[in-house]
Image (tube, grey):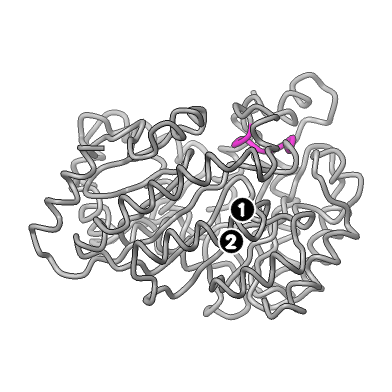
Amino acid sequence: MATMDAALAEVRDARAGPRPLALYVHIPFCASKCHFCDWVVDIPVRQLRQQAAERKPYIEALRRQIEHYGPKLMEAGYVPQLLYWGGGTPGRLVPEEMRAIHSALASSMDLSGLIEWTIETTPNDVTAEKLQTLKEIGVTRISVGVQSFDPHQLRTAGRAHTPEVAHKALGMLREHGFDNFNIDVIVGFPGEHLERTLATIETTISFDPKHISSYPFRATANTVMTMQVQRKRVERPTLGGMIEADETSRAVLLGADYHEYSHGYWVKDSQYEDRDANYTYGMTGERMGFGSGADSVMCGRFLRNNKTNYAGFIDDPLRFDQVQPFSLANPGMFVNHIGGALMTRTGLNFERLRRLTGVSFDDLRGTAQIRAWLDYLREHGAEFVETDTDLQIAPANRHRVYIAQLLGIVG
């Protein structure tokens, strides 16, 4: 706690003027433990599926953290521009919990400059009362984790909803004035035939969402689905099959007038791009994460509250499990940030990296670890395009590089 407080005091005393800030609120609860989700691997089912009465200590700890750091962020000159509630499933919360968290945010920080506020949900958690509450507290965008409209695939993936529930939920969004919504789908599930993938994409498009997130299946170690692949209970995905599913889906999206602005992110109109994703992956500015499992990039430091230390967060929400200055001494901590930037249309901007971390890319790629990682990307097909200001992966093969990396995890 003292480390973060001291860092914010240094920023305040420097009087460098307004600083853009993205806020993230983590809600670590879900209706089910999905078989493909790497976030839930280390989370006990009983904790994950807690009801409102059981969640009260977490909500109170979350409010304490917000109410402590919020005023300090304001004093240091930060200006919140984006707010994102992720998880887990924030839509799992009941209206009283939503209002309590919003009250802590609004009383601790000036939210008048927000340009986008997104909350994640699943179809089975959408209710009229919750949507009305979200409208009242100021949410502007909803991201719905549908993943598939195929009943067999939903059962295989361990989802808690059916296609019919998804259809109803998406209809309710528009009924309650939420025209700006995203639909999440996954392409290339193990054993999924191409026609089922295409049926999900076509059904998704039929709702005419402002935003579609179409992700290739991520075979993360220790997920139920990856273990099923390794034990030969479901068909092992192949590089050719994954690329075919992704590229066929891409063709359908392009034919429906969607365009891809970052890997897997599709819109018809650029005004509906996910501003939080652009900000985060593009390294536009600092990000403060609240809650157990949340990450922050603040004051030249990477901060984290470990998702497995749920009880520790409740006991002391003002302490961070990890507070690590960005440094050439640990180049590995840059990989996820640079990797995210390379998946965007603009790639890695050298000045943004330096401003956010205090470290130059020229110095970074002089380290053995980053050189080896860039070579690893080349081995997976990356064709780099570099200018004086940025480094990009050529758009034509960016998706293939991403998929090749994902399949490397299965072994």
User: Is residue 81 positioned above or below 264 on the image?
Assistant: below
User: Is residue 275 positioned above or below 4 on the image?
Assistant: below
For this rendering, which residue is in front, 154 or 161?
161
Q: Which residue is drawn at 64% across and 69% down?
A: 133
Which quadrant would residue 32 be assigned to in this image? top right
At which x and y percent is residue 3? 20, 38
At which x and y percent is residue 170? 78, 68
- Magenta segment includes 39: yes
Q: Is 263 on the left-hand or right-hand side of 289? A: right
**What residue is shown with label 2?**
119
Q: Is 286 on the left-hand or right-hand side of 214? A: left
At which x and y percent is residue 173? 73, 72
Q: Residue at x 61, y 45 (%)?
A: 88
**What residue is shown with label 1?**
90
Label 2, secondary structure: give it: strand
Label 1, secondary structure: give it: helix
Q: Is residue 374 visible?
A: no
- Among the two numbered marks 2 and 1 on one chain, the one whose residue lies closer to the N terminus: 1
At which x and y percent is residue 311? 50, 28
Instruction: Magenta stretch: give its range.
Output: 34-40
| Kind of residue at badge 2 | Ile
Magenta segment, prevailing SS (helix, strand or loop):
loop
| Kind of residue at badge 1 | Pro
Residue 331 — which label?
none
For this rendering, which residue is in front, 237 or 53?
53
Estimate the spatial distance between the alpha carbons at disc 2 and disc 1, rounded to whole Å.
Answer: 7 Å
Q: How many residues crowd around disc 1 within 10 Å: few (fewer than 14), some, or many (20 or more)? A: many
Q: Is residue 170 visible?
A: yes
- Magenta segment includes 193: no
Tags 2 and 1 in contact by the CB under 8 Å rule?
Answer: yes
